Image: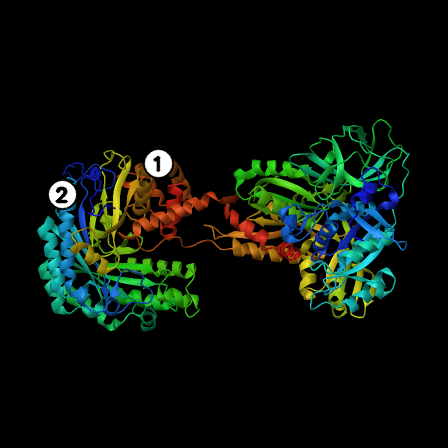
Amino acid sequence: MPPIPTESAAARIQPNATPPELIRNFCIIAHIDHGKSTLADRMLQLTGVVQARDMRAQYLDRMDIERERGITIKSQAVRMPWAVTGEDGVETPHALHMIDTPGHVDFTYEVSRSLAACEGAVLLVDAAQGIEAQTLANLYLAMENELEIIPVLNKIDLPAAQPEKYAEELAHLVGGDPADVLKVSGKTGEGVEALLDKIVATVPAPTGDADAAARAMIFDSVYDTYRGVVTYVRVVDGNLNPRERIAMMSTRATHELLEIGVHSPEANPTKGLGVGEVGYLITGVKDVRQSKVGDTVTSAAKPATEALGGYSDPKPMVFSGLYPIDGSDYPALRDALDKLKLNDAALNYEPETSVALGFGFRVGFLGLLHLEIVRERLEREFNLDLISTAPNVVYDVTMEDGEEVKVTNPSEFPTGKISEVREPVVRATILTPSEFVGTVMGLCTDRRGQMQGMDYLSEDRVELRWTLPLAEIVFDFFDQLKSRTRGYASLDYEPSGDQAANLVKVDILLQGDQVDAFSAIVHRDKAYDYGVLMTAKLKEIIPRQQFEVPVQAAIGARVIARETVRAMRKDVLAKCYGGDISRKRKLLEKQKEGKKRMKNIGSVEVPKDAFIAALSSDPSSGKDKDKKK
Amino acid sequence: MPDDGALPRWVGTARSGADDDGGRGGDSGRRFGVYVHVPFCSVRCGYCDFNTYTAAELGGGASQVAYASTALREVELATKTLADVGLPERAVSTVFFGGGTPTMLPAGDLVRILDGVRDAWGLEPGAEVTTEANPDSVTPSSLEELAAAGFTRVSFGMQSAVPHVLATLERTHDPARIPDVVRWARDAGLRVSLDLIYGTPGETLGDWRESLEAAVATGVDHVSAYALVVEAGTKMAAQVRRGELTLPDEDDQAAKYELADELLTAAGLSWYEVSNWARTADDACRHNLAYWRGHDWWGIGPGAHSYVAAEAGRATGDEGAGRAGVRWWNVKHPRRYAAALEAGGSPGAGRELLTADEAYLERVMLGVRLADGLDLDVLRPAGRRAVAGLVARGLLDGAAALGAGGVAPRAVLTLRGRLLADAVVRELTA
């Protein structure tokens, strides 16, 4: 029997008319590069929803950035038919909903909502590399959500694959027999049919009350230029029908339901969505903030009384100043951020001015990857050249007089008497080959971490659990981790409250004038190192002026490090005869042009490039590059 | 650049003969100078980026032998080109033979070229005729021959008195010869200048003092001192890149400039341009002053530049409107240069028509480098506003800026200002 249901069989699994017991909702948990999108491609082909001639690699990844980097930023949901033949020889069609989740630490909340829309998860691991920290974190998340886990090793066609070794590791993690770990190749398609069969066999069917008031959970919300906001939902109870008014339970806002349907994988309008089904809604709203991930959709006419659990507003964890390199691009940057915001509920920003960098925005991000993605989209899709300040976290400062200040920009750190500063901490999971355990523990200790636990996943791989200040991770932690473990360690973290810490603001002064872009909040024990590092770097970068320029690092009024840019003594070309005149004039014209790109900090002239160089040669900026892989 | 090298019609507007201004932008009295480039050297020095060739590089000495005839063809072309746009014929007030090493040519060849210039335009009474010379390519008799033919001045490339510095520069002459060649030249009735270079890799402040003292000891009346600039593409640039030579920093160069000014001033020479010192006003190089004051000149030879100013406000027409002058330059290679002239065309390779803004920048840039300074009236309002700050920071002389001593207020660099002259120009023209 063919696994693609026949026409008559397919009639039993029409949207809004499929019995929940024929539905299977699952997601794929995998590390970047472990082949999730390629496996999804094979599934699309095998289930016949994408014809071979229409196939392209990473079919479901829509944004260029996603396809190029091989990561999924936004989730996707695809309905696929799949028939299995029972022992009695009867073919039963099923509707599979594959929810392709975002795969990164910054988007843990989105991941948790995607998982909440499923009953099962395919744990996909590269048979040549084994599980990574981020996959492990998502696996734990899936287990907490009581999802049925199907462990799968991918890329078994690779010469370096060690399926036996990693099967044991997976079995150890999820419990079970190594022999039960499926082995597939997304590239060749080997084992994928068996995987689909196993999904039908082991993932529980959704349950819900078809007669209750409609309740559907939003697990993603995407802005589309032509259609407005497309909202992805999983129906829990009741059903949603076209042309009815729906209500968002968090805001009580109601919208006309313009279109409802499933993706298969192209949008396919339906007569509604019933219990257990996964599909999309279009209401004509233009901003994803009106259709928030985690919210519950109900019927406006017959609303449910209780929202589904788990809703929370996205909370920016990391802030950075974004400035156009060409100041005249400021309005373009504002417009671009406004556009990105339509599709990114977690993005928030406020105008900010910097003496060193001019007009820009202080932008809040979910994490470093989110920052990097936003920055890259701004540069690529909107053609902007940007400079970003070193990312920082949010500090809660309590003054001695009881006043509380939330600091998202180091230069706003209060100057009066401070009684306490609290900083966010994260629970970090680090997987490393056992030979590097000592190194990694040294790094974590250096970064003010506290060890919470340690487990051997297998003989030579260790899982370390630490709490660390987020600010330390945001600095060059990931770089350091990678370089000290020859690239083998992987990291995942999730917010875990805050803690009081002995933090101070270090200012950088040029001839007594503060350079706001370089102020940093650091632990008192690290203040001196930061001061020495930054003053030395600026000394190299700032051109000599006609006068001596002190470069200082200070905590309040106390100078902790100082360098001096000596006065320029010579700025004249020795020769200027007949043939030199044009050349020298052109040189002067060029120098004068260059002066326009100078910023004045007090009376010190600094090429804007120098600030950019100082910010981009910052040790914390390299990690973004590494994370791309 | 047109094939025949024709000048824009607008440079040819009639000029009055009065000589009351002497500066660019005035209506009249621009002097006319001739520069003759001699593109030959016996060896190419490692730091040199001038347009010069050794016999080996030219693949035989043929073009060197024919050079005087070729140069004379350009003199002929020049007379015609200037006359074609209606420029009144002016006697030449200065002639300068530079290189390369002009004295690589037999004295007779230099004399032939000078005679050709004299035949073409005539020389003003008391005209200055200079040649550069390598100390090891002159003899008492060659210098006498030049003096007899009308040369009035010789500038020797001494560069340094210290053997290891000369070796780094790849100069082949024997420093002990300098006092002799200076004496021979003076005996022949020539004014003498010595060129010095400071800031050669490996040169100490003591080495530089030794060179300055040696130059002063010859009793010359004119010294030019240049900071070594390592130009891209030279052998020395490659040596620096490979780490074989280390360049001195700007502080070292500044200290050496200050030492030069101190020792030369003590010897009775005073600065008249940032890199030039002379005993009296008459000892200054009038040909170079003509460049700095915006007079007209024709450069003969491969790679030579020429310049003709337009009468203020007279430049009109499609490309002439608002133009302040035209500067052009010849093809660089001697063979291409000779071929162009033999074919009856112009050896010109390109030209620029200066806008008023460009001419203004040049005038400030060149004028401010002179000890006479720049008349503040020349400056645009923004430039005039910058003067007070420059005086306050010790870069311009306060008394000169106020017009002390009955002279019009002028921008005159202080010693510190001379070392930061480019910064001063940028501020004055901001």
Cα distance between the residues tagged 1 and 2: 35 Å
Q: To which chain does the residue with label 2 belong?
A: B
Residue located farthest toward the top when viewing the structure as drawn: A301
At label 2, counting other C-alpha atoms closer than 10 Å, the crowd grade (few under 14, some 14-19, many 20 or more) is few
Chain letter of disc 1 in the image: B
User: Does residue A521 appear to the left or right of B390 in the view shown?
Assistant: right
Quarter-of-image position of residue B320: top left
Q: Nearer the viewer, residue A285 or A19?
A: A19
The residue that mark 1 highlights is B380
Kindly state the secondary structure of the residue where label 2 is placed. Answer: helix
Measured as percent of width and height from the top left, residue A62 is found at 66, 45
Q: Nearer the viewer, residue B236 or A91?
A: A91
Query: x%, y% of residue A227?
Result: 68, 34
Whether residue A447 appears in this view of the structure is no
Query: Horizontal placement of A337 versus B366: left or right?
Result: right
Number of the label disc, if any, that sits on residue B83? 2
Label 1 or label 2, whichever comes before in sequence order: 2
Q: Residue at x 77, y 35 (%)?
A: A270
Q: Nearer the viewer, mark 1 or mark 2?
A: 2
Q: Secondary structure at mark 1?
A: loop
Q: Amino acid at mark 1?
A: Arg
Question: What amino acid is at disc 2?
Answer: Ala
Q: Is residue B320 left or right of residue A31?
A: left
Could you classify mark 1 by the number of other residues whose Cα lies within 10 Å: few (under 14), some (14-19), or many (20 or more)?
few
| B43, A592: nearer the viewer | B43
Is there a contact, CB below 8 Å, between mark 1 and mark 2? no
Q: A187 or A561, which lies in front? A: A187
Residue A439 quadrant: bottom right
Residue A218 rendering spot, x and y as whole percentages: 79, 39
* Residue at 13% from the left image edge and 46% from the top image edge: B80
